[in-house]
Image (tube, rainbow, N blue to C red):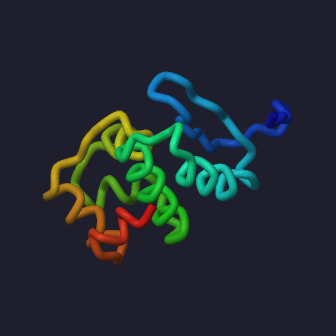
Amino acid sequence: MLIIDYLSIKTICLIADYRLAVYINSSLSNYIIRLIMRSESYGSKFIKLGLQIKKIREDKNLTQQKLADKVGIHLSYIGNIEIGAKRPSLETLFRIAEELGVKVSDLFRF
């Protein structure tokens, strides 16, 4: 069982289910992302894709807004991709990968 200290909640929002948002302390985010990406109970490929894009974006110290501006899409669309709520086109995936400085195949390494 994971106990979250609600007094120290930061800005990381991780979608564990299509409708359930779990806010976690940012120091736990990488651990939780790896845990969910290994888990078969959260098998949606789009959730895993979104988490991978988010991980790469954060590793590059980019905000969602900066990535959205570079890719030429709306901020909310990037957010929805990262939580698995939207299914980006192949063209959009190529633009995201290009702006993140990775290959498209790197987005699917989960």
User: Is residue 5 shown left or right of residue 27?
Assistant: right
Residue furthest toward the front?
40
- Residue in the foreground of this view, choosing between 57 and 29: 29
Q: Residue at x 53, y 36 (%)?
A: 15
- Residue in the foreground of this view, choosing between 95 and 20: 20
Looking at the rendering, which quadrant does residue 90 occupy? bottom left
- Residue in the foreground of this view, choosing between 1 and 89: 1
Q: Residue at x 35, y 62 (%)?
A: 108
Q: Quadrant of the C terminus?
A: bottom left
x then y, percent, for residue 83: 44, 40
Q: Is 31 drawn above or below residue 109 in the view shown?
A: above
Q: Quadrant of the N terminus?
A: top right
Looking at the rendering, which quadrant does residue 14 occupy? top right
Looking at the rendering, which quadrant does residue 102 occupy? bottom left
x then y, percent, for residue 36: 58, 47
Q: Residue at x 45, y 27 (%)?
A: 18
Residue furthest toward the left?
91
- Residue in the foreground of this view, choosing between 6 and 67: 6
x then y, percent, for residue 66: 39, 58
